Image (cartoon, helix red, strand yellow):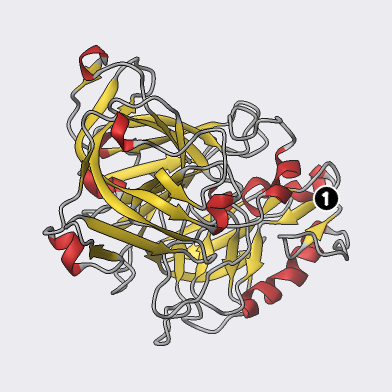
Amino acid sequence: MVKIHSPKYTLKEVDFKHVPYGEVCQAICRRNSLLSTLNPLRLLPGESYKDRAFSLCGPLGDNDSHVQKDMETIGTSILEVRTSSCLVKRYASIDTGSDLVWINCKPCNSCPEKENPPFDETTSLTYHRFPCLSLVCTKEEDFSCSDNRFCNFRRTYQDDTEVKGELGIDIVLIPLANEPKFANLSFFTFGCAHYSNGSYNRQTEDGLLGLGRGTLSFINQLKAERFSHCFPPLYRNDGRGEMKFGSNAELIGGRTPMLDVPGRQFNYFVKLQGISVGDVRLDLPDRYFDLRSDGNGGFIIDSGTALSTLSDYAYYSMLPMLDKAIGVKRVEEYMYPYQTCYWPTERQIRRVSLTYHFAGIDIAFYSSGVFAKLNSYIMCLSINPNGDIGPSVLGALGQTDLNIGYDLSGNFIFMKPRLC
């Protein structure tokens, strides 16, 4: 998640640090962390999941109706940014599977009452509406010209959430990690949503921060050719991770090529070649995870999807091997939104490892990246079958304690397990 602050002081009173675009480092924390203001009751993270049974998985493409419908936004993270001259804190989900930044704005039809009212652009001294004549508005999908010659946007996400409004331009300030100063992003373009339904009517977030590769994504407007993030476990009380941009980004560990998929520029596709449970590799056909001509298949890394997914055959081939490794029976009842749950001890969970074999690198996932704690007794597999629709996904929970670096100029993704 992204926390969008609107400070009470004017531009002259803000202690700016005019760092080069892209040279930014910022602390983040999990949405369900005990540190997060979006976990106001400070419940055990698993206990607040049931109120958040929905997800955003990136904009709909022509060939996929959903990646993981009716899932949760658990596991997403918080980053703080501020607009130049407004008054109220804002929150938006960090999403590497989307390429637009937007927040709810006044007037907002269908927006429920929340802790934070919609952003009122009339209170910003530097806000401007985006002109219709821009190529973004006239050439790209999901944008159109209004009768008053300003640019409108409309987005439909994988869980059927619809968001629409106008594009705006303002100054965005990003608090720098370990410094009482801000990086200043002038002429930043974002969506000012006047209508939203679905997920954003049922949760506390006020918008979305797209980190995909599209023209108006946060990373593209930041002019950073690289960025990295490291998400802490949900259950760590001091669960603070980090996001780094530009030369601060940590491109460490092994690397795998970033695949170019026409029409899906907002997603980070990589080549998954196989999966192992412990030392035993799943018996899958060659090129099983490759993108198919019907648009399904493939594998993406997506922080906007909480749970990871696998195609049905791979998922159900993996389960008997996990059962054997854990050594306990599954929970018979369906524990929404998780497909598979167990009654294990911590010791039984700790001995389970799952390895993804990417092109050029093998990454082993252990308990925090494979299981989610539903309550004090039940652990659930944080991977679900996807019904063979769309790509398989490494979701936010699967990225726990994993430093992921994105080299956009070299077209590589770096991964290294570490404590975040």
Query: Furthest-top residue in view?
Result: 13
x and y, in percent, of residue 198 in the image: 56, 58
**Element type where label 1 sits in the image:** loop
Q: Nearer the viewer, residue 292 or 271?
A: 292
Q: Which of the 4 image quarters holds residue 168?
A: top left
Does residue 83 appear left or right of residue 306 in this picture? Answer: left
Q: Nearer the viewer, residue 298 or 81?
A: 81
x and y, in percent, of residue 20 in the image: 17, 31
Q: Is residue 282 above or below residue 277?
A: below
Q: Nearer the viewer, residue 192 or 226?
A: 192
Q: Amino acid at mark 1?
A: Ile
Q: Nearer the viewer, residue 397 or 126?
A: 126
Q: Which residue is mark 1?
A: 378
Determine the residue positioned at 64% across, 39% down: 234
Does residue 263 appear left or right of residue 326 in this picture? Answer: left
Determine the residue positioned at 34% across, 14% down: 180
Query: Furthest-front residue in view?
Result: 147
Does residue 365 appear left or right of residue 329 in this picture? Answer: left
Asked if residue 420 shows in the view, the reply is no
Q: Is residue 377 above or below residue 238?
A: below
Determine the residue positioned at 35% across, 39% down: 250
x and y, in percent, of residue 95 in the image: 43, 51
Does residue 228 appear left or right of residue 173 in this picture? Answer: right
Q: Which of the 4 image quarters holds residue 163?
A: bottom left
x and y, in percent, of residue 201 in the image: 56, 51
Determine the residue positioned at 71% across, 54% down: 352
Query: Furthest-left residue in view?
Result: 133
Asked if residue 61 shows in the view, the reply is yes
Instruction: Assess disc 1: are there few (<14), some (14-19) or many (≥20) residues with their C-alpha within 10 Å of its C-alpha.
Output: some
